[in-house]
Every structure is written in C-alpha cells, then in structure tokens.
Image: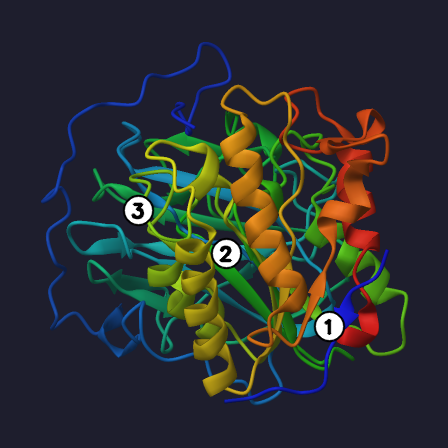
Amino acid sequence: MRAATRPEHRPSSRSWLRRTVPVAAVAAALFASAVAPADAGNPHEAQASHAAPASHGAAPSHGWVATWGTSPSGKVDNGCASCTIRDVVHTSVGGKTVRVHLSNVFGTAPLVVDEATVALPSTPGTAQVQPGTMRPLEFRGTQRVTIPAGRAVVSDPVRLEVPADHDLLVSTYTPGYSTPMTFHPGAQQDSFFTSGTNATEATSAAALPQKTQAWHFVTGVDVTGSHARGTVVAFGDSITDGYQSTYNVDHRWPNFLAGRLNATHHPLGVVDAGIGGNRVLLDGGDGFGPAAVSRFQRDVLDQTDVRTVIVLLGINDIQQEPHQLDPAKITAGLSRMAAMAHARGIRVLGGTLTPFEGWSTYDASEEAARQGVNDWIRRTRAYDGYVDFDAAVRDPADPHRMLAVYDSGDHLHPNDIGYAAMGDAIDLGAL
C-alpha cells in the first residue's frame, strides 16, 4: 500500500528516570530555582542566549541534515543531583561531522550543562564506548553552557564518522540540582545515568549503571558529509513514537521508513516527532506535550533542512476525554498545520487514522469521527498526498479493527510487524 499523491499544491503517567533496582519515584515538587544563572563574566562558560527561542528559527542547513530527533513533551523532577545522563539515540543517515541539540524548553530556570560528549557505542544499546570515538562537545568554543529557561542550543560541529542506522551516545553532566529536566518519555529505548559525578568522558558502561526509559535534554542530532538530500519529519502521537514496539531495537514506523530510504541512492534523514498521547487541538500536560498545532513550528518547521512532513494525528482527539467527535474541528487543525508547512515550501503528506475497535473507549460515535477524518484526508487538497495507514493495517474482514497479526494486543497500537507494514506503506517517491 503506497502513498496517494496529488499535483503540487502550495498556497502515559510513569516514572521516566528510574534506577535499575529498585525503581525510583519521581518527586512531586519542582525546583524552579535549583540552578542559579552562572557568572556571565566567566570566560570559560558559554551562555546559550545565542540560541533561538524554541518556537522560532530553524537550525541553518549549510549541508546539514537531521539524522535523529525527538520532541520534548514536558518536564520531570527526577531527584538526580549532579547528574550524568547518557542518552542512546539511533541515526537514520550517516555523516562525517555531527552537532547536537540540547533543550531547556520546559525548564523553569537556567540549565547549566557543565560538560557534554558524543561517542559511538561498542555494543548497540549499551553505555560502553567504542575506543577512539569519544568527542567533547563545545558551544561557541567552550564546554560549559547555560541554557535559559524556554530555550535550546546547538553544539559546535565535531568530527566523528557516524554510520547510518547506528546507535549514538550523547552524555550530559548537569552539576548540582538542576531545573526540572526537559524530557521525552516512552523512548522505547534504554538510556543510562548516574548521580553525584561527572561521567561524560567515561568509556565503561559500569560508570553509568542506572537506566532510564526517557531521553533527557537531547532533542536532535544533525550530520554533514552524508548523501542525504534533506529531512523527513514524522509528526504524530504514540503510534509514530512507536509505543508497544520492542525496546532497544528501533522498530518504530519512522525507523522502517529510514531503512527503506537508506537502501536508495538518495536517502533522507528521518526525525521522529511523535509524542504519546498527543492531540491536534488540546494540550496534554507534562509527558503528553502541547497541542500539535502549537508545537508544529518547533517540532517540524524548526528542524534542519526539512523537505517533507508526514502528519498522523487525530486519534487521541477522538478517543481521549474530552472526546472530539466533530471531524471538521480536527481537520481544521490539520489544515492549519499544512498551510504553515506550505508557507515554508515543505511538502505535506497526511496519514489516515488506523482502526481501533476493541480499545477501551471505542464506540460507534468514535468510529464515525475517525471515518470522517479519514474521508477528508483522502480527498483534501490541503495535503500534497496521503499515506493510507488505515488500509495498510486494517483487517479486511473487519475494517474497523486492526489485523490481528499487526496488533500489539491493546487494539490501538501496532506491534513491530504492524509498524513495519506502516513504514512500507509510504511511497518513497512522494517524499
């Protein structure tokens, strides 16, 4: 099942940072002033005031493409003081030079990052560093950076041969007790951390013995020196985020799309901008992100060298309380985002909403709303084309339900096989 194209038209509540044994409780209080602004006169410290506000200004391209990205969805106070976090991320395309995006967009005070590094792992899914690959990150020539609340920063370029379809380790050390951490929960990926010490340059996995199932601070990795011709952003909710896929194997549908693109002679970088629980029209609170219409600028338009966005959103507006059962209100939000993308010369593909009969809230009124949104996606000229994810995973004998072989068991989220079917449903020529 491939994307239908048209002629060009332009006008979950969990503890996210947990100890290996036992699971650490997430503290309730938020320490808004835990980190004081650093002394601006310190010549060894870079202030992140040069970074664009999170809602304005894409990272300049100049040959850069995004090889990995995630959407920060809230803040967490995890009780980790003087914390080193080693985020494990997975590239889509390779390159010879890298730069890293760090975010304090949900922080309530300046965030001090005393040191940060990037490296390749010796074994996928671990904190063990491959010898000879550790690189310090600098920000305007200094290793220490202060990121104001609500802002983000991009590191200086660093030479590192980064393979396509490969894990990458990004480590950050935040001294003292930091402002609540900007994070992306539900990463479907183990990352690692330790408290009380700077372990950013440690090469042994033993230095970071504790695990987290969230990404903290790190929101993007760009590369140059690849054959990629731009970036595709997969913009969605938990289904785009890969919820219920197998941990640590990168079986989200955007990963399968990236694999197919890498098999071509003209690959594209792929950014997964899915947030579990995300809605088109309403904010979801910490962990579920702001409404899609309000985060579209930051999570799509501000990405590096974006050529195409695939939008798969609306099912949470329908099935979550308060239920939005008027398809026209959902599609108005989808139209608004498409217009924003077209104004920047970005191609837009809409994804039809996948079936969910058997899910806890499912009823005839919710099904009618889903069908109404899908009818619009298949016929609208607000999009440049569509990907029929619905047709790709539904049961032909009962099209209101996901085919059993694709169903994770909750009747809403696909399993690994279902996500592979979704990744295969996209016409690469439409991108």
Query: Looking at the figure, which quarter contains the N terminus?
Result: bottom right
Residue lying at 61% horizontally and 46% vertically, measured from the top left: 371
**2 or 3: tag closer to the N-terminus:** 2
Q: Is residue 47 visible?
A: no
Q: Are marks 1 and 2 in contact (CB under 8 Å)?
A: no
Q: CA distance from mark 2 to mark 3?
A: 33 Å
Position above or below: 363 against 94: above
Which residue is labeled 2 in the image?
117
SS at mark 3?
loop
Q: Which mark is residue 283?
A: 3
Q: Say what amino acid the circle numbered 1 marks.
A: Leu
Which residue is labeled 1 in the image?
268
Front label number (1 vs 3): 3
Q: Say what amino acid the circle numbered 2 marks.
A: Thr
Q: Which mark is residue 176?
A: none
Coordinates of residue 283 in the picture (x, y in percent): 30, 46
Residue lying at 72% horizontally and 46% vertically, measured from the top left: 390
